[in-house]
Amino acid sequence: MKALFLFSKLSLRIKLILSYLAVALGAILILTLAIAIVVQNYFTTTQLEALRRQAQYRAQQISFLYPRSQWSLRVAPGDPVILVIADATGKQMLCSQPAFLNGGNCNDPTLEKSLTQALKGKKEIDGTLQVSTGGSTISSLFVSVPLLYNGQIIGAMFLSTPQAAQNFSQQANLAILLAGLVVAILVVLFSFLIARSLTRPLESLTVAAEQMKQGQYTQRVEPPKMQDELRRLALTFNEMADTIEADVNELRNQEQARRDMLANIAHDLATPLTAIQGFSEALADGMIPDAETRQETAQRIGREVQRLRRLVKDLQQMSLLESGHVSLDLAPLDMYTLVDETLNVIQPECEQATISLHNDIAPAMPPVLADSDRITEVLLNLLDNARHHTPTGGNIHIGAHRKEDKLYIQVSDSGTGIAPEDLPHIFERFYRADRSRTEASGGSGLGLSIVKAIVTAHKGTIWAESEVGHGTTITFTLPLARLA
């Protein structure tokens, strides 16, 4: 458990190196054992087979010489084998062995047992004999075979030679061990390079994540060149960072917009409230003795109250539209007819300013799916804005054209236009390109924001195009109605 705890505290790079090294050394160890066993078995089998052939040859030689020499046998000096011959009773007639071996090897229980089994008729007995050399013991392979003459067992022969595979196996194991050490060193170097290539991107990701935790949302990582999971992880991290940065910026913008909105609301409320307070105190203190002046002051108070009510109503409507809590009464709507009706409402005010109104929508234009009251509000807001920005003798046109499954409605005027720096912001709440005009007219600064919210609720879009001195065109889209 302590080793696992210590291993868990190591860095990922060290863990990878140790893992590679453990796998490599384990494979080398298993390979060494497998090769040693295979080599040992191969040489033992080969040597034992050669010993069997030699035993068969000597047995045939002894059987051939037996009628003439009986057991008068001689062994060539320097023979590196142990040769024991016993007669049919088990008595040893010859025991020959190299000079460096102890004489007691001829009485080894294993040797006597194998001779006994051969005398009983077992054709061939083999195995391993531990031979004493005086200071140590060595392994020696042996074979025992019966000696036959005219089909009768006349004795048995024991033949043994030192096992040659042992030294070779030791040398092979040493060579494999040295090769394993070289491979282990190469594995360490290779695993270090691999672990470094794997952990470097992770270290970069860790550093970037730490910096993002501290609020540095612009931090990115360099994706590895290899097309693998780490590259996909780095790319995903960068995409996530882009999303987080965008969300944070959006939250900051929304927070700033909220502060601006509160400041604008406070300003728009303070102005009429200050006027109401001043007029009310003047009336209460009797500072306006003239009846006509008092009547005019009361009317001013009423206008300021109406201004406050419009502001509160616009705020309520804006809040409901943006929250999606306003239900729309959608039905097929003829825009040509609706525009005609709306122009009739605003016609008197435009006639006083000698502004011409034009309905350029074709009567055969297909109907849209919309709430007539809400779209009327959109048109009135846009026409009222156009009227205030169009000089005497100007023109206001409302046109429409169909594209795919939408109807594009344009409200164009020949007015003063909108400055390029103001154009992207005109649909923002309380944004006023001309604050003095809006305040003088009693506007709340929410008209175009409400227009955008209504169009968006109809799944449409709205935008403005303008050139200073050449008028403004505001375009919005509505979905076409699907008639059966």
Image: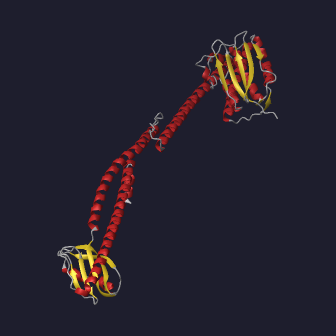
| Image position of 300 (left or right of 241) | right
Mark yes or no: residue 297 visible: no
Q: Nearer the viewer, residue 172 or 249?
A: 172
Residue lying farthest to the front in this orientation: 68
Mark yes or no: residue 159 visible: yes
Q: Nearer the viewer, residue 142 or 157?
A: 157
Residue 461 placed where, x, y %?
68, 28
Residue lying farthest to the bottom in this orientation: 89
Above or below for 9 versus 35: above
Residue 98 placed where, x, y %?
19, 75
Marker count (numbered): 0
Q: Which colour scheme is used?
A: secondary structure
Above or below for 4 versus 190: below
Residue 428 placed where, x, y %?
62, 25
Residue lying farthest to the top in this orientation: 393
Q: Quadrant of the C terminus?
A: top right
Q: Which of 357 and 56 is in front in this view?
A: 56
Residue 409 placed where, x, y %?
73, 23
**Which of the 4 quarters of the picture holds residue 142?**
bottom left
| Image position of 133 (left or right of 188) | left
**Which of the 4 quarters of the picture holds residue 341?**
top right
Above or below for 358 versus 93: above
Residue under the image location 54 percent in, 36 percent down = 243
Q: Quadrant of the N terminus?
A: bottom left
**Which of the 4 quarters of the picture holds residue 374?**
top right
Residue under the image location 72 percent in, 9 percent down = 392
